[in-house]
Image: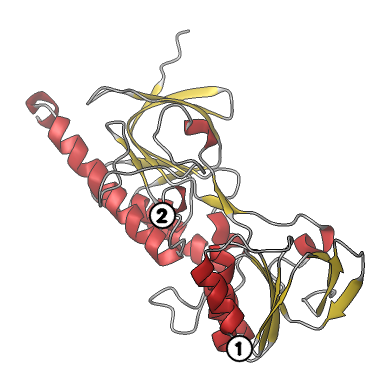
């Protein structure tokens, strides 16, 4: 009872390009940010072997190293990075109100501003061979990793607009793209279906699922199964792209923060402001269109600037003094 609850000026929930960029800007603005990393410190990029499309790395960099460098940069300016999971939130609805969060189901802390950068998790098939080869040829982002398979044969799993867009992208740089569609038709828009059907080096296999990803250390092939006939077929590929969707890590905010039907947080206009004052969202938790490290970092910068301006607006003369 006598223990005082810790009060934080800016709390950042989640790590990754968005969270660390927010931390860099917030700490330079003297917002004394505290970051809780969540279950996957560094976010999705920690499962990416090579990052070649982030500005400033002419030779490329591996994801875990990049995240470590971003953390070091944030810490250099004063960010306190803590290992822990925010398991419950109680956001204030009042301007200048104090937000309460619970860490690891046990410790309660308070924050004047909160930046949500919890990201999103790619959906996988969750078969052992697929999980074993994540980072060894199995990827959930063709735009991120497709370049490494230039001129090679690859496969993609999915039937929606994202899958067809990524198949089209891969077809431009790869020798052949085999597209696996679980049902007898695609969910993608007619326009996107027409596009993939018109591309000569895309082969679409309907009623087809992954039976096993072949390879020891890296992807060497794919065994497919027709879910109507049970017939199995093997093809030689070097890359397998899973495009069956993403799930934003926003469940704990349900009922408090506005979100769309799939759970992506809704922000106001071009800002990172949520429906609650002093709570801001950035990165893949609110971006279902681009989902790139560089765009996540950009929104992280925006969230820190929005938090700084919010605090400046509610600050009283006594606090300034």
As displayed, is residue 95 above or below residue 243? above
| Quadrant hosting residue 122 | bottom right
- Nearer mark to the viewer, of 2 and 1: 1
> Which labelled disc corresponds to residue 282?
none
Instruction: Looking at this view, name the residue that lies furthest to the top.
Output: 1
Element assignment for label 1: loop
In the visual, does 318 lie left or right of 108? Answer: left
Q: Are marks 2 and 1 in contact (CB under 8 Å)?
A: no
Q: Position of residue 1 (x, y in %)?
A: 48, 7
In the visual, does 279 lie left or right of 13? Answer: left
Mark 2 and mark 1: Cα distance apart in space: 29 Å
| Residue drawn at point x = 59 percent, y = 56 percent | 245
As displayed, is residue 90 above or below residue 206? above
| Residue drawn at point x = 80 percent, y = 80 percent | 220
Near-viewer residue (3 or 184): 184
Which residue corresponds to mark 2? 18
| Residue drawn at point x = 31 percent, y = 31 percent | 276
- Does residue 24 appear in the picture of this structure? no
First-in-chain label (2 vs 1): 2
Q: Residues within 10 Å of mark 2 (few under 14, many from 20)?
A: many
Q: Quadrant of the C terminus?
A: top left
Near-viewer residue (279 or 237): 237
Near-viewer residue (41 or 232): 232
Q: Residues within 10 Å of mark 1 (few under 14, many from 20)?
A: some
As displayed, is residue 266 above or below residue 201? above
Q: Position of residue 106 (x, y in %)?
A: 57, 22
Q: Position of residue 96 (x, y in %)?
A: 23, 25
Which residue corresponds to mark 1? 150
| Quadrant hosting residue 30 | top left
Q: Position of residue 270 (x, y in %)?
A: 25, 52
């Amino acid at each position: 009872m006598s223990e005082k609850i810790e009060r934080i000026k800016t709390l950042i929930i989640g790590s990754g390009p968005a969270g660390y960029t927010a931390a860099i800007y917030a700490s330079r603005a003297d917002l004394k940010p505290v970051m809780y990393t969540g279950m996957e410190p560094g976010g999705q990029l920690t499962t990416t072997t090579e990052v070649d499309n982030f500005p400033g790395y002419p030779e490329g960099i591996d994801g875990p190293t990049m995240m470590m460098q971003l953390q070091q940069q944030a810490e250099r300016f004063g960010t306190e990075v803590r290992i822990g999971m925010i398991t419950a939130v109680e956001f204030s609805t009042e301007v200048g109100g104090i937000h309460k969060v619970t860490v690891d189901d046990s410790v309660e802390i308070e924050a004047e501003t909160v930046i949500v950068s919890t990201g999103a998790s790619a959906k996988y098939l969750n078969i052992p061979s697929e999980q074993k080869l994540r980072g060894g040829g199995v990827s959930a982002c063709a735009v991120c990793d497709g370049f490494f398979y230039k001129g090679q044969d690859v496969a993609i799993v999915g039937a929606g607009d994202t899958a067809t867009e990524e198949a089209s992208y891969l077809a431009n740089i790869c020798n052949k793209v085999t597209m696996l569609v679980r049902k007898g038709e695609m969910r993608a828009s007619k326009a996107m279906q027409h596009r993939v059907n018109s591309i000569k080096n895309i082969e679409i296999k309907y009623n087809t699922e992954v039976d096993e990803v072949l390879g020891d250390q890296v992807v060497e092939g794919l065994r497919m199964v027709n879910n109507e006939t049970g017939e199995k077929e093997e093809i030689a590929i070097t890359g397998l792209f899973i495009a069956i969707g993403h799930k934003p890590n926003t469940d704990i905010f349900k009922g408090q923060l506005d979100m769309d039907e799939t759970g992506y947080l809704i922000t106001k206009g071009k800002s990172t402001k949520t429906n609650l004052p002093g709570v801001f969202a950035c990165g893949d938790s609110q971006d279902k269109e681009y989902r790139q490290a560089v765009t996540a970092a950009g929104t992280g910068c925006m969230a820190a600037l929005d938090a700084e301006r919010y605090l400046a607006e509610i600050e009283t003369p006594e606090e300034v003094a």
